[in-house]
Image (cartoon, rainbow, N blue to C red):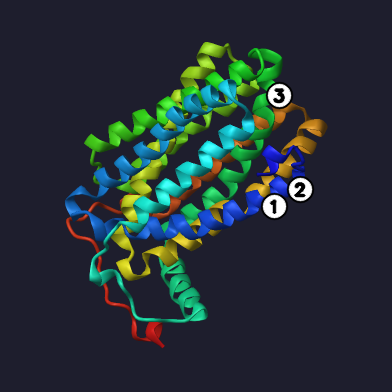
């Protein structure tokens, strides 16, 4: 509506973006928490892979459709079409019928926080990897998201080159999802962590900078590694966390993983101004690799294995107070 009026201001769009982020913070922990309730246990990894394939595939298709709509009409119309898809998604979600076992006893906010915190801090593999991604997400979002377009503007034909790099990562995400439909590693966190290391070379490639074709290949590898981690991480969480507490723990996961991203986005530019874009990208890659390798020092990350059954607990007595 603001765009159609011709009077949209940056602060207004930023405020609406904050509302969007808040809604996502409610939606994704809840939606991830109900996956074990809606598919048989033996298909849990495949379900996570299919869900993420849907997200990544729609991002690729949506980018193409959005470009056509904006070209044929206007940016405001493109955003309006996007808004309609959210109403359609809400209608589909409202039609879901969840098992009765998913309905938990009433509780209060503070009790939920305490229960989720106990589950979160009681597992070394969980808080160690969330701490890792607190730094990795901040570094990668800051360096790649802020400095990547500047590198592309200088070396890869600007927006066209950066669009190709983003498309290469999306292809890798889809490829990783397809791979995870078939592969079922026993040591899920070990494979997930080693897979995520594939995301770091892209930062080094941008720092050098390598020829565009090489960076595109690194983008595909980064997508494969990121998706391998994502599917195996969700599957591990759903295996190890009792179902009645899973969404609470996902909330702590999201909080810890995303909390430092604003700092990374704000700091990347000034650091690059002081130290240079190349040095900043290299440093980002080193931090990402170091933080990822560090979690391998946690025995549970190396040794946790896939089980045949998923933990299920009735809600604790204190959660119903």
Q: Are marks 1 and 2 in contact (CB under 8 Å)?
A: yes
Is residue 117 something that shows in the picture?
Answer: yes
x, y (%) of residue 60? 44, 28
11 on left or right of 20: right
Looking at the image, tell me whether mark 3 or mark 2 is earlier in sequence order.
2
Helix, strand or loop under label 2: helix
* Neighbour tally class for label 1: few under 14, some 14-19, many 20 plus, Cα within 10 Å: few
* Picture mark count: 3
Which part of the image, by quadrant, shows the C terminus? bottom left
x, y (%) of residue 250? 44, 60
Q: In the displayed structure, would residue 67 be above or below residue 242?
A: above
> Rounded to the nearest whole Å, what is the CA distance between mark 1 and mark 2?
6 Å
- Residue in the foreground of this view, choosing between 210 and 291: 210
- Residue in the foreground of this view, choosing between 116 and 128: 116
Which part of the image, by quadrant, shows the N terminus? top right
* x 42%, y 81%: residue: 107
x, y (%) of residue 180? 29, 37
Report which residue position mark 1 lands on: 15
> Rounded to the nearest whole Å, what is the CA distance between mark 1 and mark 3?
26 Å
x, y (%) of residue 96? 30, 57
Report which residue position mark 3 lands on: 150
> Rounded to the nearest whole Å, what is the CA distance between mark 3 and mark 2?
24 Å
Query: Of circles 1 and 3, which is in front?
Result: 1
Report which residue position mark 2 lands on: 11
Farthest bottom residue in view:
321
Query: Of circles 3 and 2, which is in front?
Result: 2
């Amino acid at each position: 509506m603001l765009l159609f009026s011709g009077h949209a201001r940056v602060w207004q769009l930023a405020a609406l973006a904050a509302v969007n982020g808040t809604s996502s913070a409610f939606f994704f922990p809840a939606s991830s928490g109900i996956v074990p309730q809606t598919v048989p246990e033996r298909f849990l990894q495949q379900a996570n892979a299919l869900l993420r394939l849907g997200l990544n595939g729609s991002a690729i298709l949506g980018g193409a459709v959005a470009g056509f709509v904006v070209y044929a009409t206007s940016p405001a119309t493109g955003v309006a079409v996007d808004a309609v898809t959210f109403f359609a998604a809400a209608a589909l979600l409202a039609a879901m019928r969840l098992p009765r076992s998913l309905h938990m006893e009433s509780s209060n906010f503070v009790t939920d926080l305490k229960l989720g915190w106990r589950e979160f801090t009681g597992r070394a593999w969980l808080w160690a990897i969330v701490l890792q991604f607190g730094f990795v997400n901040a570094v990668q979002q800051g360096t790649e998201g802020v400095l990547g377009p500047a590198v592309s503007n200088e070396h890869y034909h600007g927006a066209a080159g950066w669009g190709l790099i983003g498309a290469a990562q999306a292809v890798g995400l889809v490829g990783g999802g397809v791979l995870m439909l078939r592969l079922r590693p026993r040591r899920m966190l070990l494979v997930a962590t080693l897979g995520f290391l594939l995301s770091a070379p892209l930062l080094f490639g941008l720092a050098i900078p390598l020829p565009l074709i090489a960076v595109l290949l690194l983008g595909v590898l980064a997508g494969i590694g990121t998706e391998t981690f994502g599917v195996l991480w969700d599957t591990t969480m759903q295996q190890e966390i009792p179902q009645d507490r899973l969404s609470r723990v996902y909330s702590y996961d999201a909080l810890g993983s995303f909390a430092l991203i604003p700092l990374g986005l704000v700091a990347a530019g000034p650091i690059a101004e002081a130290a240079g874009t190349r040095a900043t990208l290299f440093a980002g890659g080193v931090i990402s690799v170091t933080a990822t390798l560090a979690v391998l020092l946690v025995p549970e990350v190396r040794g946790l294995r896939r089980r045949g059954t998923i933990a299920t607990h009735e809600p604790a007595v204190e959660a119903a107070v």
